Image (cartoon, rainbow, N blue to C red):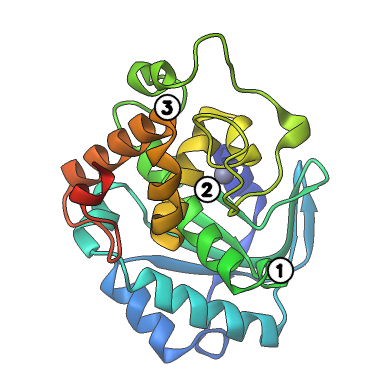
Amino acid sequence: MVVGPAAWNDLRGVHASARDLSPDFEAEAKRLHLEVVVAAWDRSEGRTKYVRAKKAAMKVALKTLTEELARYDPAFVRRIGFRRILICAGLSKDGSRAWGMAVPETGTLIYNTDAAQGGLSTVRHIIHHEIGHLFDLSSSTPGSADPPWMAANRKGWDYGDRASAWGAGKLDHHDLGLVNSYAAWHPEEDKAEIFGLMLTRSDAVILACANDPHLNEKVRLMDLRVRRIGSPPEGWPSWKRLK
Ligand SMILES: [Zn+2]
């Protein structure tokens, strides 16, 4: 999910104090030059709500964030404009729960510690999904302003199926050109899902590409763009395997 800069202003956090964080996470954030903000209070402001994360949930979140952020090169993070992490719980916008959000204007990844309810693979995926938004929206072809991407879809098909906008992080591959139903919502989500799945389930994505020229073209574009930035995240599949 992508939110505008107002949501950042709504989310009144404080800079993390040492007791909120772990030394490993702090070292990782420092390596990537990321500012860390921890939501300090339960708030309901504007269209975005959140609460302060509980200590135990925070511990789990920091461990996973540390492991997944370790896969990124500082140069990649800098070039996509990723600058901050906000950690909170109970995140929602307009009444819809969100396990993560990206605020491209401020280079912020908002991480909801409740994501742990979806299991470890969901948590890992959410982190990369939101970074995928920052990557896409910092590019010269953000969101739907991306003729090659839009042309990769089937003729006559269009985004906007909010009713089926669930299943992020899964690989249902229910429709030609899409990794899952969540990707059908918006080009931004389509790209973030592919970026995330390339880092969590790349074998399955590549397998799905074999019988799907539309998806294959999108993955090819994504791969090209990630490599153009340079220093792809650790575990990004090699070009050869994409045919
Ligand atoms: Zn998203």
Among the two numbered marks 3 and 2 on one chain, the one whose residue lies closer to the N terminus = 2
Q: Find numbered disc 2 in the image and state the secondary structure of the residue it sits on.
A: strand
- Specify whether 234 is left or right of 192: left
Q: Is residue 63 visible?
A: yes
**Are dots 1 and 3 in contact, CB under 8 Å?**
no
Cβ of mark 2 under 8 A from ligand 1: yes
Identify the residue at the far front of this view.
211
Give x and y (percent) for residue 116: 67, 72
Among the two numbered marks 1 and 2 on one chain, the one whose residue lies closer to the N terminus = 2
- Specify whether 237 is left or right of 48: left
Give x and y (percent) for residue 174: 62, 37
Residue occupying image coordinates x 40% and y 40%: 209
Say which amino acid is labelled 2: Ala
User: Which corner quadrant of the figure contains ligand 1?
Assistant: top right
Label 3 packing within 10 angstroms: few (<14), some (14-19), many (20+):
some
Query: In the picture, which quadrant includes the N terminus?
Result: top right
- Give 235 or 175, whichever is nearer the viewer: 175
How many labels were placed on the picture? 3
Say which amino acid is labelled 1: Asp
Rendered image quadrant of residue 24: bottom left
**Are dots 3 and 2 in contact, CB under 8 Å?**
no
Say which of marks 1 and 3 sits in front. 3
Q: Is residue 108 visible?
A: no
Query: In the picture, which quadrant includes the C terminus?
Result: top left
Q: Find numbered disc 1 in the image and state the secondary structure of the residue it sits on.
A: helix
Residue occupying image coordinates x 51% and y 36%: 190
Residue 214 is tagged as 3
